[in-house]
Each structure stands twice: as structure tokens, then as C-alpha cells.
Image (tube, rainbow, N blue to C red):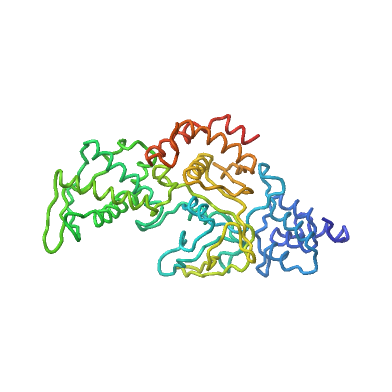
Amino acid sequence: MNPIRTPQSSVQSIFAPGSESSTTSLHAAVTLRDDKAIARLRNEGVRANTLDADGRSPLDVLENMRDIDERSRSGLYVALLQSLNPTAPLGYTKPEALHGTPWGLEILQSGALKGGVNDAKGGTQSLEGKVFFSDRTPESTADQATRPDLRSKPRVYAAGKGLHPSNAHSRAIQHRMAQVILHALNNGQTLPATTAAPLIEVANQKQPQIEGAAWLQRLLHVSYINTGGGRKFIGTPLDEHLNSLKLPGSVALKSSGQINELRGEDLNRFYHQAASELQRSLEAGKAPYLGLLNQGGIVPLVFGFEKINDLSTHRIQYSSKIKQYSYQDTEHPLSGHPEKGGKLKELEVRSLSDFATLCLGCAIKEVALPADLVVRIKGQNGEKAHYLDEQKIRAFRQKLLAEIAEQAGNDQLQTLSLHRLQDINSSIRASFLSASVKQTLQG
């Protein structure tokens, strides 16, 4: 690109050390169409999310420039957003809109972000039924920058945590704990008991599994998962922490004014029915499949999109300030809207292990990753993130699928039980990700 000619003394005075704050220096470089100055400032640590006195980011300045050809605009855009990470593909620009979710496999399978799949706020001010994004706009009108860490809120949402038993994080652990209960009962083990004796209203004394499952879900959520005690069941053998899971020593069922107290074998039968129904409902789509496959551990995914035009803004009143969130009324196809843009370009995972679980889930559900997708492995302990381009993704998946096929033997993945698939997932996370595989990806 060829920036406009400006007297050298003028350029030097604008970008001389201490002559102008980092808040406006990038804006000036954009105005002067000086991509080299932009690159130098960014390498010195100046971020493209700073706002000027008018509340505009450098990207806003560029977007509102009218007397510029598209080639020059594209060059400045790349200079502002090109990744400085050495592992990123050459010329790779950062996403401008992000959406975090524990339902990543379901989204890839459907090909679109569905409204309400990951309702970010909940409660009375919820925008349930709409798709939330964290884009490059200020979170508050008083902010001096756009979102300081563009990925922070999508990562929170991707963990699927919330206060209610219906949140994805809780449901994944509920499923694992239901497996623990059923494993113990099927093997004649005694469930540790508490002195509690709850009363549960049911429609039919002989078929109490629906109400029993709802009661068990609330019990596991309130007594274990919401207090942090459910974490120990994630990814551990089914009988390892049985003594930490205590259920009431008696339960009374009430219907049509009749009360039936359950103890001993009758109580175990009730627990088996309730846990089986809870497990069935969660496996029927009420919990993220990757969370079930990963033995109760959510696999958070953050989707990164190219610029999305015409996002709406929703403001929520908190006790001390108002925050604003960007959203879209309609579902958002991963291939992007013809007019609004927003094509999926990046998928962020926490670790290579999480990516292996995602690839296994894709193989089971026969879901294809987009051909030109870049995978971003989040950096750990302050390290830079690591990027996998299409070639590295293909090499990794080929090795992984060969390992999966060896473990599955002559069986098709789709015919295997969830227990068997969980074992395969656990194995590839523990042993497949050897130094040789990592070296192949980093080469």
C-alpha cells in the first residue's frame, strides 16, 4: 500500500516519544494512512482499542474515512488488526466479534448461532432468544477503550456457569453424578445416607421418575455443584468419590393425599429411576454433548467472526453503572450473512486436549470443521496463544482419528455406548497428546 505523502518533519513530530498519548497516536497514523507507523506503534504495545476524545477507536476512524480506495483501507485494517503472535498464519487479522459457548459442537452441527442457546445475562433483563456478541464497542459510555479484553466475557459465557440447575456447567456435572449413582446401584454398592427425609409430590406412585429426576437435579445442584463439591466427580472413576455423595436415607412420595415412605430396596429403586430419567433427559439434548463426553467437564469454545454490520445494543442497569451488550435478533449463520457479514474465521479452545475432545465429538456426530478455519489454542500461564492453520489441523486430525480407530477396534463410533466413548476421550486426553504430536503442530 502507498500512504499519502506527508512532510517527514510532520510525521516525526506526531509520533515522537512523549509528543502524543497512545490514546490518539494510532488515530493520527490512520488519518495519515501510515501503515508503517501503525505497525511500529502496535509492536511498541499500543492497542487498537483505545478511544479518542470523541469516543472513537482507530477502527472507527478508518471506517468513517470516505476519500480512500479499498486497497488502502484494507492495508490499514490489516495493520491495525494483524496478529502479532508469531504462531499466527501470515497476515492473520484478529476477529472483531466473539461469541463464547459450551454448546460448540451443537453450533457447528447446526451451522449457525441460535437465539437463546447461550443467553448471556438471564433474569428480568434478559435478551433470551437473541444472539449475544462481544464486539469492538465500549462496554460503558464512561470507558476509555473498547472492551479491554475482547475475549474475557465470551470466555465466561463459554464456561456455561450460572446460578440455576439448568446452566450447562451444572447439567454436565449432574450427568456425571447420575452415572456415579447408577454405577453404585448396579454393582450392589451402598449409597451413603444423610438424615434428611424429603417429601416429594408425584402424579403416580408407581412411576415417580419424572418428579424424582427434577428433585434429584435440584439436590445435586444446590448441595454439591453450587458449593464446588461437584468438581471432584469430573473425569474421575465412577466409584472414586462415592463416599462424598450422600443422599437422604428415606424419601416420602405423596400423591392424591396418600404418603408412601421409601427405605431400603424401595428407596434404591426410586434413586435408580430418578437417576436414569435425569441421565436420559440430559443425553437427549439438555446438556452439551462435549460436556458429557468429557465426563462432566465443559469444553468451552469461543467463536471469532469477521466484522458484523448493524449489531444492536442492549443496556443493562447494574447497581453502580450501566453496561451495554451487542446482539443480533436473528440467528447468525457461521458462513456469515450476505449483507451483514460476520463469517466464522477462528475457533478458540483452552488446550490441545480440549481440541482433541472436540475432534472426537465431531467424528462421533459426523460434523465437519469449516475448511478455512483457524484454531487458536489459548495460552497458559501468560504464554502466547498458539495457532493451528488448516494444514496443521488436518495433520492433527489424521493422527487423532487413527488413534481413535485403534481404540474403537472394529466398532463404529456411532454404535459405542457413552461409557465407552468417555473412556476413549479420557485416553486420548491423557496419552495421545505426546511430545511428538505437539512437535508436529509447532513445526
Q: Quadrant of the C terminus?
A: top right
Q: Is residue 89 left or right of residue 355?
A: right
- Of residue 265 and residue 304, the one placed in the foreground of this image is 265
In the image, residue 215 above or below residue 349: below
Q: Is residue 50 left or right of residue 225?
A: right
- Of residue 258 and residue 319, the one placed in the foreground of this image is 258
Which residue is located at x 54 percent, y 52 percent? Answer: 302
Q: Position of residue 110 (x, y in %)?
A: 51, 55
Q: Is residue 307 left or right of residue 423?
A: right
Image quadrant assignment for residue 436 = top right
Which residue is located at x 77 percent, y 56 percent? Answer: 75
Q: Position of residue 270 (x, y in %)?
A: 20, 49
Q: Is residue 185 left or right of residue 104?
A: left
Q: Position of residue 341 (x, y in %)?
A: 64, 62
Which residue is located at x 16 percent, y 49 percent? Answer: 250
Q: Position of residue 371 (x, y in %)?
A: 62, 48
- Of residue 351 and residue 270, the one placed in the foreground of this image is 270
In the image, residue 74 above or below residue 298: below
